[in-house]
Image: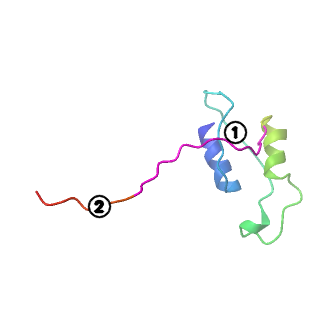
Amino acid sequence: MESLCQILEHETRRLVIDQTQLKDSYAIKLQWARDASKGTSEPDTSRPSLFTAVQEQLGLRLESARLGVKVFVIDEVQRPGEN
């Protein structure tokens, strides 16, 4: 699922968090229409959108949600002093 999340993050340009609790390895074949804004000239209408493909072909659902994300903030950086 980790690899699938990485692919979905790249395609959606959004953070994808695995909440399936599936730990095994899976061979996944997913076919969807590439987004026309990603450089393809014509949208492929013969295939479903990524969100539809994930649901229909994998039985999974992509949901938009607001979740707490841990963030590490650096307020200041200083060069080390001489010894």
Which of the 4 image quarters holds residue 18?
top right
Image position, residue 1 (x, y; %): 63, 36
Contact, mark 2 vs mark 1 (Cβ under 8 Å): no
Give the magenta range.
Answer: 61-75
Q: Could you tell me which residue is drawn at 86 percent across and 51 percent down?
A: 48
Q: Is residue 44 above or below residue 62?
A: below
Instruction: State the quadrant of the C terminus.
Output: bottom left
Front residue of 44 and 70? 70
The question of residue 71 being in magenta is answered with yes
Left or right of 53? Residue 3 is left
Front residue of 61 and 33? 61
Which element is circle 1 on? loop
Q: Could you tell me which residue is drawn at 37 percent across and 59 percent down?
A: 76
Q: CA distance from mark 2 to mark 1?
A: 47 Å
Q: Could you tell me which residue is drawn at 60 percent across and 27 percent down?
A: 23
Left or right of 17? Residue 83 is left
Q: Could you tell me which residue is drawn at 78 percent across and 49 percent down?
A: 31
Front residue of 43 and 14? 14
Q: Magenta: predominant secondary structure element? A: loop
> On residue 78, which mark appears?
2
The residue under label 1 is 28
Image position, residue 35 (x, y; %): 77, 62
Image position, residue 71 (x, y; %): 52, 47
Which of the 4 image quarters holds residue 54?
top right
First reached walking from the N terminus: tag 2 or tag 1: 1
Left or right of 31? Residue 83 is left
